[in-house]
Amino acid sequence: MGPSFNNPHCAQNYDPLPVVLTRGQGAYLWDVEGRRYIDMMSAYSAVSLGHAHPRIVAALAEQAGRLAVPSRAYFNDRLAPFLAELCRLTGLDVALPMNSGAEAVETAIKAARRWGHWVKGAANPEIIVAEGNFHGRTTTIISFSSEPDYRDGFGPFTPGFRAARFGDLAAMEAAVTSETVAILVEPIQGEAGIIVPPAGWLAGLRQLCDERGILLLVDEIQSGLGRTGAWFAYQHENIRPDGVMLGKALGGGVLPVSAFVARREVMDVLTPGSHGSTFGGNPLAAAIGLETLQVIRDEGLVEKSRVLGEHMLERLRKIRAPALRAVRGRGLWAGAEIEPRYASAREACLRLLEKGVLSTATHQTVVRLAPPLVISREDLDFALDRLEEVVADLAAVPSRANAVARADREEA
Ligand SMILES: *Cc1c(COP(=O)(O)O)cnc(C)c1O
């Protein structure tokens, strides 16, 4: 392998697959040796429009050359049209722009707490979250994670959160107290392994929140903007949350752009001086955000995700291989669970890489399949053919990792 993968100046907080990328176009990525790959994870949905989308690249150049970052100390002519479109699409009233997804979640938490203090009259506002959640990496957000890897050694943690089982309405209901101000959930848990809750669960949460005077906050940072075959995954349940977090795909694959969008009563508690971000809402980000929403609409990417997603899941469900334990997903977003007796999900990803398909493992057992929504049916089928070969091979040819583990066991 030509280039060196481990640079002593790179912090070791990631464990990348052994490939050095240098170029991307649509659903393709190229490594420094000129080898082409199909991108089957699209940077966790950040690249839903594909790499270097021509309209995004043009909007980026045009806006960067005109006005990029004047600060929110002034109005700019790009922000309002972008936020108006976010409100129109979500059916909510007010949007607050940030950069990373975690900042949008932090914004939702701050708004919910202040709403809890000022509107609901809670002395110690508490937010109910789901076990197995992923909402980002800040100190407060990892405080309510149930994943030891995300938390170990980072305490003390922020109080005020209570976890209940994902997909379990009765458990969420049992967790509600007089201090509960909000329920914060992903409509489908991405990092947990593309976990789809039972039908009716989100609608049940909506009803529970209405009955108890609690805010329903839905994190659509990964699931939103077409990924599941709807603009927002909560639309599958015909509900409207009180607040929605968006990010990832909102930046068109070129910038971090996020937002918290909410009912007016919720957002109005954020008064001047109480919250902000130096880069949040800059005209460059706003121009890219608006262009992204328009590209999704103009290219019919939501419908495309629904149709190609059904095709992908149908193909995955037909695979009969002992190394493929389960598949689940919605739209162009699926998890293929690898039977750990045969191999880790990382081993499956390494073999896919050798065959020209890029994916990643989430936890030890799940291969994530989330191609750019612009992917062609042919390229998707190519990637699924390779996956089929890999899972067939995993059972036939024991993986290196597994052989080593077996040798270790025998030695012990
Ligand atoms: C990725 C993700 C986040 C965090 O977004 P960052 O941009 O990495 O801060 C939050 N919530 C969900 C559901 C995500 O998938």
Image (tube, rainbow, N blue to C red):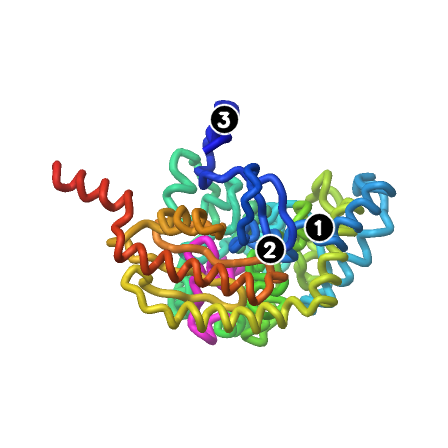
- Mark 3, other Cα within 10 Å: few <14 / some 14–19 / many ≥20: few
Using the image as rendered, state which of residue 150 and residue 268 is in the foreground. Answer: 150
SS for dot 3? loop
Q: CA distance from mark 2 to mark 3?
A: 28 Å
Q: CA distance from mark 2 to mark 1?
A: 28 Å
96 sits left or right of 172 in the view:
right
Residue, far top: 8
Is 187 part of what is drawn in magenta?
A: yes
The correct choice, above or below, for 59 with respect to 165 in the image is: above
SS for dot 1? strand
Q: For residue 215, which quarter of the picture? A: bottom right
Please state the horizontal and vertical placement of residue 176, each as a whole percent of the image.
44, 63
Please state the horizontal and vertical placement of residue 137, each as a whole percent of the image.
51, 43
Q: Residue at x 45, y 41 (%)?
A: 17
Which amino acid, by three-letter code, is at mark 3?
Asn
Q: What number is the disc on residue 27?
A: 2
Q: For residue 234, which quarter of the picture? A: bottom right
Q: Which residue is mark 1?
A: 97
Which of the two marks, 1 or 3, is nearer to us in this view?
Answer: 3
Which amino acid, by three-letter code, is at mark 1?
Pro
Q: Residue at x 59, y 72 (%)?
A: 235
Using the image as rendered, state which of residue 407 and residue 165 is in the foreground. Answer: 407
